[in-house]
Image (spheres, rainbow, N blue to C red):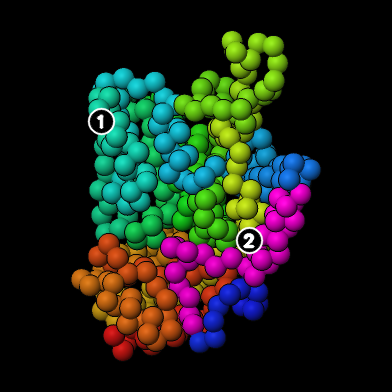
Amino acid sequence: MLVDKKLFPIPTGVTYLDTAAEGLPPLAIEAALAAYWSAKRRGTPGRTRLFEEQKEVEAAAARVLQTDADNVVLLANSSEALNLLANSIEWKAGDEVLISDLEFPSNVVVWLQLKRRGVKVVVIPAVEGAIELADWSAHLSARTRIVSVSQVSYKTGTQIPYLQELSVQAHAAGALFCVDATQALGRVPVSVTGVDYLVASTYKWLLGTHGLGVVYLSPELRSHFTPGTAGWYSAEKVFYPERFETYTPKTSAGQLQAGMPNFPAIFALRPGIECLLTVGVERLDRELRPLVAALRNGLAGQGLAMLTPAEPRFASGIVSFAWDQPEQLAARLAEQGVIVWGGDGRIRMAIHLYNDEEDVARCLAAMKLR
């Protein structure tokens, strides 16, 4: 086992397989939130500690991404971050955004709202839960302004194994490359090589709470980027004689953060990230791959209509299958102590560092009693 289950709030007799919806923070989160309150209760003298924690947690998030801390900022969530990107681009009629039908609504709605400005959203359909690099290549053109893709699909668990190759093709077409890593960061290795902009919510695989998202803004994009939002927190300096005439944005990814961040969520994120860094995401992914394969193969062996591709190169921490009444099945499994996600025409199961072989066996046994 990668970690002691006693470090997490898992009730006795419960198999928790729903991290893709809500991750379980380590119990150390209580001490982290107490540390926030200890600083906050001091009023303005406590601000120094709040600002220090922000810098330290951003640096920790940067280590997970294997990048410099200047490239990382903590915003409210992935949706806010995607909207910020969309509103920072000078669009013109005829521009195109390239996505797939494996995307979560956050990475769809933000682009659909640009239709009023003449922007076209091109959606690539998956075939049996997968999309190949050639499918993206066939849709790239001089009109493509952004390619926005989830490294791991919320719906099927399909992981895109060719992100760097896709980024090269996107840039060759003159487009920006955006990655939604919400279902990847903290669970599978994530690389920002070739990525212009990356977002990931923290309340799932990163083992944090709501109200926070990790955002990566590449140095290359920053060199010619004007954020679509601004505030005192995004400025290099605030109180100076010319402040009613001009301002200078921060040179770091902090230029995206208009105002005070969510300090409680920042304090709460530290224990989760520290746990992941201690285990190591590469090791975590390597050792959990057999569990994911056993779960998918076991479900397929029961004759279920699998949505998750069988090929190992597409594997992540998520396994899904189609089901007509998913909410009802999820409720029946919960009665047996197995917590999964049921909705959107499917059952979704997720395996993280606090899961083991016993969880997989118990889930498969419960499915036989469905």
Task: Name the one closer to the observer, 134 or 227.
Answer: 227
Quarter of the image for the N terminus: give it: bottom right
Q: Relative to residue 163, is residue 253 drawn left or right? A: right
x then y, percent, for residue 2: 63, 73
Label 1: state its secondary structure. helix
Residue type beneath disc 2? Gly
CA separation in Å, label 2 and label 1: 39 Å
Q: Which residues are magenta?
A: 14-42
- The quadrant in which residue 167 appears is top left
Q: Is residue 176 left or right of residue 98?
A: right
For the residue pair 244 and 360, the one nearer the viewer reads as 244
Viewer-closest of 282 and 197: 197
Asked whether the viewer can see residue 180, the reply is: yes
Q: Residue at x 35, y 51 (%)?
A: 104
Quarter occupied by the C terminus:
bottom left
Check the image and report above or below for 348 versus 33: below
For label 2, the residue is: 272
Describe residue 137's horizontal placement relative to residue 159 as left or right. left
Picture quarter containing residue 361? bottom left
Q: Residues within 10 Å of mark 2 (few under 14, many from 20)?
A: many
Q: Who's the residue at 47% across and 52% down the image? A: 182
Label located before the other in sequence (2 or 1) = 1
Q: Secondary structure at mark 2?
A: helix
| Magenta-span inclusion, residue 20 | yes
Tag 1 residue:
115
Spot occupied by residue 185 in the image (x, y as percentages of width and height) = 54, 53
Residue 38 painted magenta: yes
Determine if residue 161 is in view: no
Which of the 4 image quadrants contains residue 72? Answer: top right
